[in-house]
């Protein structure tokens, strides 16, 4: 069972159901990743999603990654990739990790792509969730292709257009 806790700062449009968006995106990413057993497991696998300001993301990026700039999404895994399979057989509750999205960066990227901020946020939550599940596009070209394929499957399940096809 996947539990999602999401909150949004005042910069994010309050008319959008960010918590529902985050929950759907996390579950779609888990299903697309092949970690489907987590959805039905006795363990409550929890993901925290925070929709916040560029400034907060910049502070987190500087503190945890030594990069003094805002970025679109940060992921903070709490479970090592090799421990994920054991979670499906566990009982209790496990925090998979945290995902943090920067409003200004997300909105600017969405505008540049000509897509809705909500759709871009869905993509970023999917991307962040896949990182929590051990995917890493920086490890190798094959790993990047596998992660991109999982993103495409998850976004298709959410009714979101393929972001990589749009890039040309």
Image (cartoon, grey):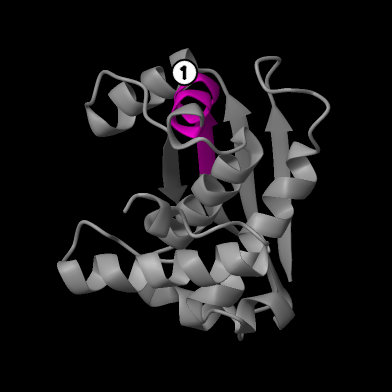
Quick check: can you spot residue 78?
Answer: no
In the image, 2: left or right of 76?
A: right
Residue 109 lies, in percent from the top left, at 44, 31
Q: Nearer the viewer, residue 39 or 72?
A: 72
Quick check: can you spot residue 66?
Answer: yes
Q: Quadrant of the N terminus?
A: bottom right
Q: Is residue 104 magenta?
A: yes
Q: Nearer the viewer, residue 124 or 120?
A: 120
Q: Quadrant of the C terminus?
A: bottom left
In the image, 145: left or right of 59?
A: left
- 58 shown above or below 157: above
Q: Residue at x 18, y 62 (%)?
A: 139
- 148 shown above or below 111: below
Residue at the farthest left position? 140
Residue 111 lies, in percent from the top left, at 50, 28
Q: Residue at x 72, y 54 (%)?
A: 23
Q: Residue at x 61, y 45 (%)?
A: 119
Quarter assignment of residue 161:
bottom right
Q: Is residue 29 magenta?
A: no
- 139 shown above or below 85: above
Q: Residue at x 62, y 41 (%)?
A: 49
Q: Where does label 1 land, which residue?
A: 54
Please report the bounds of the magenta region as a residue range: 99-110
- Please tell me how crowded label 1 is: few (under 14), some (14-19), or many (20+) other residues with Cα within 10 Å: many
Q: Nearer the viewer, residue 136 or 148?
A: 148
Label 1 secondary element:
helix
Residue 137 lies, in percent from the top left, at 27, 60
């Amino acid at each position: 069972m996947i539990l999602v806790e999401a909150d949004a700062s005042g910069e994010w449009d309050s008319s959008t159901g960010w918590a529902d968006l985050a929950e759907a995106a996390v579950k779609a990413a888990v299903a697309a990743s092949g970690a489907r057993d987590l959805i039905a497991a006795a363990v409550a696998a929890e993901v925290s999603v925070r929709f916040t300001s560029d400034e907060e993301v910049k502070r987190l990026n500087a503190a945890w990654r030594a990069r003094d700039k805002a970025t679109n999404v940060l992921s903070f895994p709490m479970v090592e990739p090799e421990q994920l399979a054991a979670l499906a057989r566990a009982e209790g509750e496990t925090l998979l990790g945290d995902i943090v999205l920067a409003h200004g960066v997300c909105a600017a990227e969405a505008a540049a792509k000509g897509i809705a901020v909500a759709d871009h946020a869905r993509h970023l939550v999917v991307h962040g969730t896949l990182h929590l599940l051990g995917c890493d596009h920086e490890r190798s070209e094959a790993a990047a292709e596998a992660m991109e394929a999982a993103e495409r499957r998850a976004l298709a399940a959410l009714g979101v257009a393929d972001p990589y096809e749009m890039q040309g």
